[in-house]
Structures are given as C-alpha cells and as structure tokens.
Amino acid sequence: MKTLLILGAGTGGTMVANRMTELLDTNEWRIVIIDRDETHYYQPGFLFIPFGTYKPEDVIKPKRNFLPPTVEVIFSDIEMIEPDENRVRLAKEGQVIYYDYLVIATGSHIHPEETEGMVNGGWQKNIFDFYTLDGATALSRFLRTWDGGRLVVNVAEMPIKCPVAPLEFLFLADAFFHERGIRNKVDLVYATPLPGAFTKPIASKKLGDMLERKNILLETDFNIGEVDSNKNVIRSWDEREIEYDLLVTVPTNMGADVIERSGMGDELNFVPIDKFTLQSDGWENIFVIGDAGNAPTSKAGSVAHFMLDVVVENILRHIEGLPLKPDFDGHANCYIESGFGKGILIDFNYETEPLPGKFPLPGIGPFSLLQESVANHWGKMSFRWIYWNVLLKGRKMPIESQMSMAGKWT
C-alpha cells in the first residue's frame, strides 16, 4: 500500500487530507497526517481577541473534528524529514514513517527572540504579540485597564502571516479607544520595514491615506535592530528611535524548526518551491501548501485555499506520470477590518495588484474592492463559519482558485 504523508494539520494540511480522501483509492493508499498539537486554531480570530470581540474559546476546536475517519492521525513532534530516503522520523517513540508522496503544511511561526531585547524585561508586560492565542489573550487583559499613552505596532521583517493584520489591528484599536472615550489620550504609530503601508502600490496608497485620516503615524523603512525595554524604545539599524508605552509586535515569522533541521529551507526556514506548480525545488514527490513554502505571495488562509486545487491536481498528475500544471497564480483575497463596522476587500495575484471593483459578482458584488463598506465587514465576520464548516473540509467554494479580472476597474 502506498502512503501520502501530510505534515501539519492546520488549514492547508487539513484541506489536503479531506480532498485527497475523496480522490485516492483507500484500497491502494493510506493517508497519514502528523501534527504536534491536537487543537486547531482559527488564527484570523486572534486579531479580535484583544478588543473583546472574540474570546479564546471562539477560535479553538479539536483537530480531529475536521479530519476524515479514514485518515491516520498522529500527534507528535517531527524530529527530521529525510527526503532522499522518503521517510520522516518522529520524536514519539522514535517512530519512522515512509511515504510515497509528502505534503508539507508546517506553517509559519513567530520568533520574537530573533530581535535583540524583544523578550527581555517587557515581554507580556508592555510588549505583546497578537499572532498567538497566548499573546492576544494577554494583550486583551492589558487593554482592559490601559488608560492611554503611545501604542506602537511594529513589524520586525517580511514576510509575515496576513500582511494586512497589523493595519487591521491599528484600525480596530482606533475604534476601540474611541468607544472607550480615550482616543485623545492615545498616540497610534505604525513602524514597518516596507516603504509604504502595504506591499502593493495602489493598496499602499489607499491604506496609507486611511492611516493619515485616522491620525495614525506611519513610520516607513523601519528595520528594527533592537528593543530597549529599559527606555521603552525600539531602535532601527539606521539608529532611528521610536518611543513606546505599549509595543504590539509582529515578530520575525519563520518556517518550522524541522525544516531547518532537515536542511530543506531557506534562511527563514521556508521550503523553496516552484511558485506555479507548488512542487518542491529539490524533490519531485514533495509538494508544499500554505505558509510553509517560499512562494512570493501573501501567507494567508485564502492563499492556502487557492493553492489546494493546484496541489491536489499536481499530485494526482504526478502519480499518473503526467506533466504538472503551472496553475497557481499567487491569488490572494483579504478582508481588511477598518473599524466602526466597516471593512475593505483586496483581491490580487503575482502579476496584478489590488484594483477597485465589485466581488465576486461583476458589477453587483455584494463586496466592494479597495473601498470601505459595511458588507465587507460582514464578509470578514462570516468567514469564521465558512472556515469551520466549508473551507477546512476541502469543499469547493464559489471563488475560482485563479484570480479573475471580471468586475475590476483598471
């Protein structure tokens, strides 16, 4: 019997397990999925925890709930991937699993220790992240009693999971402090290594204008070198300093440690892949989905969903000895909470930056591209139900994997 082995039971790995269960003959194939953690986290929901919109229990469910009964599930740390031998070594009892095809879905993880001084002194006292459940929950407790000062949101380096999340945090913070009646006592600052508010020029201009309108200071080209928690200062490599009373950091994002141990990653432990076929550069029977690869697109749940069709089809084509299809175009679709019950939607790919228009129905919507609307906010809030009930199960959605220009205004 042949084995399809999936590393990681997060968004990408779970979708692959569900879809491949429907397509592979269970008399000929076993599907095995490995993860270190039995809890599935709805990571887009972490953003809302600091502001009291969600509670921790709203964003967690058991991973087994979303995996087919025919899939063999193993909860263990992964010691080593040995791709030349087609095997994976587990920390659990020294177990070794051989595979015919491997899907790497090990994700991206924060590493605050990569920035000098980040975890010394002020960590989870007046320095917080919101990219982990613990960080978002601790920040929620802090904000309940904080009476104002200088709040700095800093991105350590790119790439990060969900590049719009720091902007969303600032927009929601602006609304949160208005609702508490202390916005006049809070200075909001966004310090980013990017030359603008976002990675794409048109969206960067739109989002930068929104920051200015909301009286949020934008500090660009800020490449953080260290955190001085004694002085409450972050310092860039070019020796600029930004003072803070509260620092909300998006630390360095890196691929899983096992990728580094296995010698399969780049300098940030992301697996080099063909950005169109999603096949590993080094091994033809290894494919990568989601944040684990180095595809030059957003690391976001929508991207993993759009990758799914390509990964699945190309595994099946490789099994049959057919050439792979270079069909992944970098498609990303991101709702951006802008506060006060409104949101923005952007839709883009490798070649086309976000443009205004209507989505998904051309001229109708109901969602507006690159414009604020109430409908966009509700699109964002409804995604949690879609995530648990549709997306994770690998079901088809009424949005094509490849980006469409229909409904966009050029």
Image (cartoon, rainbow, N blue to C red):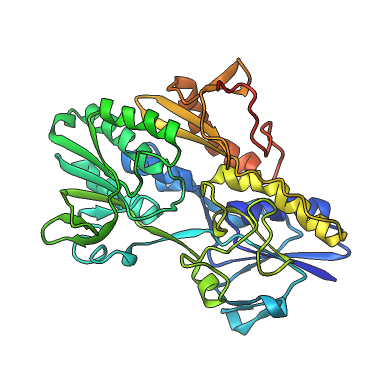
Is residue 167 shown left or right of residue 399? left
Give whichever of 233, 9 is nearer the camera: 233
Quarter of the image where one finds residue 97 = bottom right
Q: Is residue 146 visible?
A: no
Q: Position of residue 175 (x, y in %)?
A: 29, 29
Quarter of the image where one finds residue 264 = bottom right
Q: Is residue 192 visible?
A: yes
Q: Residue furthest top?
A: 363
If the image is split into quadrants, where does the C terminus sit?
top right
Give whichever of 74, 103 is nearer the camera: 103
Quarter of the image where one finds residue 363 = top right
Is residue 44 shown left or right of residue 14? left
Q: Position of residue 381 (x, y in %)?
A: 48, 32
Residue 183 position (above or below residue 287): above
Total marks placed: 0
Give whichever of 405, 145 is nearer the camera: 405
Is residue 245 shown left or right of residue 404? left
Residue located 59% across and 56% down the image: 63
Residue located 56% across and 62% down the image: 106
Residue 311 position (above or below residue 94): above
Residue located 16% across and 60% down the image: 229
Q: Position of residue 266 (x, y in %)?
A: 51, 67
Is residue 381 shown left or right of residue 174? right
Q: Residue furthest left?
A: 231
If the image is split into quadrants, where does the N terminus sit?
bottom right
Q: Position of residue 164 (x, y in %)?
A: 42, 40
